[in-house]
Image (spheres, rainbow, N blue to C red):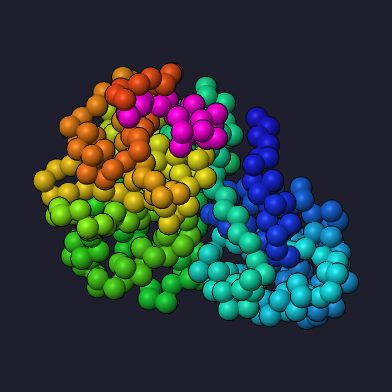
């Protein structure tokens, strides 16, 4: 299956038109390298800092290596050599700059810290995840949900995909988090924490409760949750907090960004097992949420969850352009409205509520509530605010 990621390619090109440096950020194995290799005009313009030869080239004589190049220059896993950032600032400021720099990173904390300190005002950002419903034909959407969007997981058959995802999680525990963490947890304790996260997918998250369950310090759990966010494993959706004269729930909801990884942790190997699992509804909620955020191009600063102690809630509240929109995610084949939807529509002064479900067609549920099939999100992107 040949999947061409034109949207991300265009985003990179546009980013480099407005800034001399572009940061392409996303989880490991999301396809950053494949995309970047298609943009680098010459082999000598590509540096992979997990390759010892390339690493030495840029450690021993970085200015000599980079200053002679022109056109697109790609530096993969750039966070491994933060000493490059001051030099990139100098190169980006050259008159009639002959080069543009594309930096790839799967460990956002180090990379973004280097950018904020050295490249402020000179860098644009592009985020990339695994495949989404805008890139995959509808007949493969169930595979995308079960196996996740990371290309090696999505493109494999069920047994090989499941084993690949387990290996991916093992590498995350034994290599990536070991390199990034200041406070260390033993691998066995990290596995228990990851399993707890998978079991908590789609629920309100509390650091203190998790710390008690795992018999570890609150700050240790907090720090690792930050690392899981920064390595693009999870999303903590913040609560919508406005003065509504109601007792609002003020804790975030936790979601895996890639459901294939959550399913691997929960030992869900097939569609049959997923359909019978107690977390089936929560799994759909997280999958559909991520598709909405990515396909509609929502910023993290625009996205919230909403709930009041009396029971009303809205899975996703989006604030954009001075307007608010609500999204509910239902695994039902024919969802209807609920009192909570109507109450939230009124209390939050929402323009519209959209119910995202795994069906075939869009249909109206109310004057301001619409059911939208997840497969229709790509063509719906351009007019969702006015639909």
Which percent across, then down, holds residue 217? Answer: 24, 73
Q: Is residue 115 visible?
A: yes
In the displayed structure, would residue 141 be above or below residue 147?
above
Residue 56 placement: quadrant: bottom right
Relative placement, left or right, of 2 versus 222 is right
Q: Is residue 384 magenta?
A: yes
Looking at the picture, tell me which residue is in the foreground, 219 or 252: 252
Horizontally, is 222 left or right of 294 in the view? left
Q: Residue at x 57, y 50 (%)?
A: 128
Q: Position of residue 281 (x, y in %)?
A: 29, 34
Tell me where residue 218 appears, x and y as whole percent: 25, 71
Q: Residue at x 43, y 57 (%)?
A: 301
Residue 330 vs 300, above or below: the answer is above
Left or right of 282 in this view: 381:
right
The x, y position of residue 140, in whole percent, is 52, 26
Instruction: Name the foreground residue: 332 vs 105.
Output: 332
Residue for point 67% across, 70% down = 122
At horizontal 81% and vertical 75% (from top left) the residue drawn is: 94
Q: Quadrant of the C terminus?
A: top left
162 sits left or right of 31 in the view:
left
Task: Specify start and end residues of the magenta stretch as a single range.
Answer: 368-387
Whether 133 is drawn above or below 196: the answer is above
Image quadrant in which you'd find residue 111: bottom right
Visible in this render: residue 173?
Answer: no
């Amino acid at each position: 299956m040949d999947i061409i990621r034109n949207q991300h390619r265009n985003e990179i090109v546009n980013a480099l038109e407005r800034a001399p440096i572009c940061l392409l950020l996303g989880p490991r194995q999301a396809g950053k390298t494949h995309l970047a290799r298609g943009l680098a005009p010459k082999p000598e313009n590509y540096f992979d800092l997990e390759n010892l030869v390339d690493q030495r080239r840029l450690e021993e004589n970085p200015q000599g290596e980079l200053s002679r190049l022109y056109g697109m220059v790609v530096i993969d896993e750039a966070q491994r050599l933060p000493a490059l950032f001051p030099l990139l600032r100098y190169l980006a400021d050259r008159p009639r700059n002959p080069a543009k720099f594309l930096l790839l990173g799967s460990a956002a904390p180090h990379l973004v810290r280097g950018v904020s300190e050295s490249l402020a005002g000179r860098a644009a950002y592009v985020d990339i995840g695994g495949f989404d419903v805008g890139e995959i034909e509808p007949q493969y959407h169930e595979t995308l949900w079960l196996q996740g969007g990371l290309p090696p997981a999505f493109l494999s058959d069920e047994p090989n995909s499941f084993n690949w995802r387990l290996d991916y999680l093992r590498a995350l525990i034994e290599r990536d988090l070991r390199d990034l963490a200041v406070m260390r947890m033993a691998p066995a304790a990290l596995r228990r924490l990851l399993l707890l996260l998978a079991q908590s997918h789609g629920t309100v998250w509390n650091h203190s409760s998790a710390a008690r369950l795992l018999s570890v310090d609150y700050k240790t759990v907090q720090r690792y949750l930050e690392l899981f966010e920064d390595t693009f494993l999870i999303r903590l959706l913040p609560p919508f907090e406005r003065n509504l004269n109601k007792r609002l729930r003020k804790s975030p909801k936790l979601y895996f960004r890639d459901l294939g990884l959550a399913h691997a942790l929960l030992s869900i190997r097939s569609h049959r097992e997923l359909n019978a699992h107690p977390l089936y509804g929560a799994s759909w909620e997280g999958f559909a949420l991520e598709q909405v955020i990515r396909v509609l191009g929502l910023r993290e600063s625009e996205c919230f969850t909403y709930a009041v102690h009396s029971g009303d809630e809205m899975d996703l509240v989006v604030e954009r352009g001075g307007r608010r929109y609500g999204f509910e995610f239902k695994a039902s084949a024919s969802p209807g409205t609920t009192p909570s939807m109507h109450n939230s529509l009124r209390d939050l002064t929402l323009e519209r509520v959209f119910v995202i479900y795994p069906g075939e067609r869009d249909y109206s549920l109310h004057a301001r509530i619409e059911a939208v099939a997840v497969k229709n999100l790509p063509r719906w992107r351009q007019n969702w605010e006015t639909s």
